[in-house]
Image (cartoon, rainbow, N blue to C red):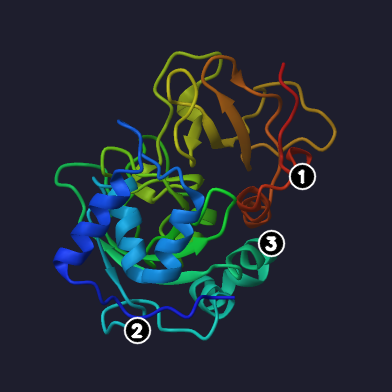
Amino acid sequence: MCLEVQPMTLSTAGLKSLITSTRKTMKAGASYIPDAKLRTSLLAEHGRDGVRVLLACEHPAWAAEVVELGHPECPWPEAATPLELATAAFGPLAQHLPRLLKRLSGATLTCAVRHKPQDDAPDLGGWFLVYALPERSGPTLWIGGPPDPTPEFTAAGWELPSELRTFYRQHNGFGVLLDEFGWTGVAPGLQPSVQLAVPALDAKVKTGDLLRISRGEGDAGEGGWCFTSSKAGARKKKPGAVADGALAIVDFDDRLGIRGEPVPFDFLGFFDRWMVGDPKDELPIAESP
């Protein structure tokens, strides 16, 4: 159930003092508040001001202004519960995301933020919907990007897959906030359209046939979940294999190449399981070669 939170009430000096005292609990060079009770109390006692503290301490380069839902320019209205909010925000996709919506229904706080994008960078700015979800380590901030019917997309050799275009109409990116260089990013989750990329390295597969949709990982930072298109004659077909030309999803390891065969998939079904951390046998992963 969502906390009964008060509007943002701290003065500029009070907020600065709270940020300073919170940062003192963090180890030198750390980017995470280690005290779970402190993380929880920030939101319980200070509401959306607590979100401002979390952002200032853990995501200082991600310039974001915290705003209450219902702001005249905000794409999302106030809702009685987090579940009602998530259902409205995902619109026609909501019926395909039962696991994710159940997870989001446990948010202790919701709000909106406006992020100012960095100039000359692949950074998505604008409105973001924030869910504070309880974890053992304290609240974790999940973000959903703004509704975007015409998302910016520049991955060479690719047209934006229709599955992603449909998703971005509701949220241009969605997942656990993990900014990099101050750019909007998520992990786990579907990256904003400007962050989608073709892996750029020499590998055992033709990486131009891959479109990475998750944050880059691995030794070279190029691995992750990717879309690929099954090509005729690319490899011997097995029973249940992807039809030629159809999109599939693969787990790309930037040292070993693709882990196993491309797997046919329902993107929303995959996303629904991926975001709630169901066991890997629920996901379309094939065994490593």
Which percent across, then down, holds residue 43?
Answer: 42, 66
Q: Amino acid at mark 2?
A: Gly
Q: Amino acid at mark 1?
A: Glu
**Distance from the alpha carbon under mark 3 to that under mark 1:** 12 Å
Considering depth in this image, is 184 or 16 the residue closer to the camera? 16
Residue shown at the point (33%, 77%) measured from the top left: 68
Which percent across, then down, holds residue 288?
Answer: 71, 20
Residue lying furthest right in this view?
239
**Distance from the alpha carbon under mark 3 to that under mark 2:** 26 Å
Which percent across, then down, holds residue 77?
Answer: 40, 83
Residue under numbered circle 3:
99
Q: Earlier in the sequence, mark 3 or mark 1?
A: 3
Horizontal relation, residue 52 to residue 104: left or right: left
Residue shown at the point (25%, 47%) measured from the top left: 60
Q: Amino acid at mark 3?
A: Arg
Residue under numbered circle 1:
282
Name the image quarter holding residue 76.
Answer: bottom left
Residue under numbered circle 2:
70
Horizontal relation, residue 98 to residue 55: left or right: right
Considering depth in this image, is 76 or 21 the residue closer to the camera? 21
Q: Residues within 10 Å of mark 2 (few under 14, many from 20)?
A: some
Q: State the SS at label 2.
A: loop
Horizontal relation, residue 177 to residue 263: left or right: left
Name the image quarter holding residue 5.
Answer: bottom left
